Amino acid sequence: MKKTKDNIIPFTGYQTLLVILLALTQFTVILDFMIMSPLGDMLMKSMSLKPSAFGAAVSGYAISAGISAFLTAGFADKFDRKKMLLFFYTGFIAGTVLCGMAHSYPVLLAARIITGLFGGVIGSIGFAIISDVFAVQQRGRVMAFIQMGFAASQILGIPVGLYLANNWGWEVPFFLTAGLAFIVAMVILVKVKPVTDHLKVQRDHSALTHLWRTIAKSDYRIAFAATALLSIGGFMMMPFGTAFSINNLGVTKEELVPLYIITGIVSVVVMPLIGRLSDKVNKYKIFVIASVWTIIMCVIYTNLSITPFYLVIIINILMMAGVMSRMIPSQALMSVVPEMEDRGAFMSITASLQQAAGGIAAIIGGFIIYKKTDYSPLQHYDIVGYVVVGVSICSILLMGRVSRMVNRKMKDKTTVIQKDEVIISEGV
C-alpha cells in the first residue's frame, strides 16, 4: 500500500464507498437509539411514564441487542459478512417501523426489544468488515468517519426528528429512519462486494466451539471487560439528557434543535482530526487525555442547575468532544485485538457486552434518578455523574492493558515479517 509523506495510507475508491455506506448504517442505527433521548420528555409525558419505565424501554433495546449479539457470535465467522449485514439490517428496518406504529407502552417496549435483536449486531458486523478490508494504519480514520454517523444524527437526524415529532407526532422520526435505512440497504446489496476471506482460515466446524474458543482466550477477555466499562457511562447518562436539559437546565424544546445541531457540527470537525491523529501517534495516550477531559466535564455538567443557554451549548460541546475523542482510539485499538478467523465472533461478543452493560446501566440510572412530578427537575443526576467518573477511571486502567497487548502483538508480527524477509533473501 502506498503511503503519503505523513505515513498515512490513502483509501481506494471502493474503500471510500464502503466507509460511506458503513457510516450510513451506523447513522441509522444510532439515530434509532439516539432519538429516544430527545423524544424522552415527550414520551414520558404523553404516556405518563416514570423515569424507571422509560429507562426500561431504553434498556429493552440494549439488553435484547446484547443477547442477540452473543447468540450470533458463534455464527458470525461462518458466513459472508455482506449477507450477515443485510439480514440483520433488514430486521432492524422492520423493528423501527414497528416502533413508529406503537401507541402504548407495552407495544413500544416490545418494538424496542425487536429492534434491538437486529440492530445490536449491525455495528459488530461493520467493525469486522473494517478489520478485514482496512489496514491497521487506516483504522483510526475509518473509525472517525464511522463515528461521524453519531454526530450526523445530531446535526441532521435529531433536529429533523424533533421538528417532525413536534409538528406531526413522535412516531414520524421512526418512519423516516426506516425509510433512509431501506435506501442504504439497497445500495449495499448492489455495490458492496462479498467479504469472505475469513472463511478461508476457519478451523472450527461447530458454532458453539468457535464461540467457546473465542471467549476462552485471555487477551480477548481483557478487551471484552474494557468494552463493557466504556459502554456504561453513556447509557447511564444519555437517555435522560434531554429531560435533564429541559427540567433542570431550563432549556426549551425549541432550543433543543440548535443545541443538537451546534454540538453535532463541532463533533464532525473534531472526529476526523482525532482519527488522523490516532493513525499517527499513540492511540492510548489520546484515549487517556480524552477520558480525563470527559470526567471533568461530566462532573461539571451533572451538577448544573438553571443555566444560560449559551453556556449549556459550550459545556455540551466540550463534553461531547471528550466522549468522541476517547471512542475513536479505543475502537481502533480493539480492532487489532482479534485474529482474522475470530473477528466476527469477537466483534459480536463485544457488541453483546456493550449493549448488555449499557442496558443494565440505563436501568440503574433510571432507579437512581427520580422526579416528584412530570414537570419537576430530575433528582440525583449528579450521583449518576459520580458513578460514571468511577467507571471511567477503571476503563483507563483496562484500556492500558489492551494497549500493551496490542503493542506486543504488532511487535510480534513485525518480527515474523522480518524473519520471513531474511529467509527469502538467503534463499535467493
Image (tube, grey):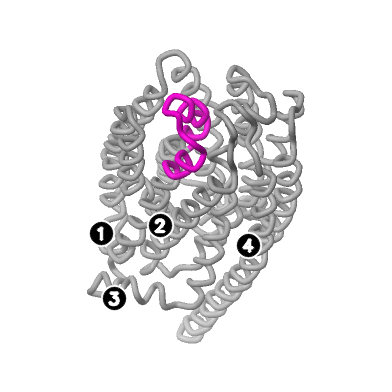
Label annotation for residue 128? 2
Q: CA distance from mark 3 to mark 1?
A: 16 Å
Where does residue 366 sit, x and y in percent of width and height?
Answer: 53, 45
Q: How many labels, in total? A: 4
| Residue 79 appears in the rendering | yes
Label annotation for residue 395? 4
- For disc 3, the neighbor class at 10 Å (few under 14, some 14 to 19, many from 20) is few
Q: Look at the numbered disc 3 and give the secondary structure of its residue.
A: helix
Q: Nearer the viewer, residue 252 or 325?
A: 252
Q: Could you tell me the amino acid type at mark 4?
A: Ser
- For disc 4, the neighbor class at 10 Å (few under 14, some 14 to 19, many from 20) is many
Q: Nearer the viewer, mark 2 or mark 3?
A: 3
> Circle 3 sits on which residue?
209
Secondary structure of the magenta portion, mostly?
helix
Of label 2 and label 4, which has the lower sequence position? 2
Q: Could you tell me the amino acid type at mark 2?
A: Ala
Of label 1 and label 4, which has the lower sequence position? 1
- Residue 113 to residue 260: above or below: below
| Residue 13 appears in the rendering | no
For the point 73% across and 35% down, the residue is 315
- For disc 2, the neighbor class at 10 Å (few under 14, some 14 to 19, many from 20) is many
The residue range painted magenta reads: 34-58
Q: CA distance from mark 2 to mark 4?
A: 23 Å
Q: Nearer the viewer, residue 192 or 35?
A: 35
> Circle 1 sits on which residue?
79
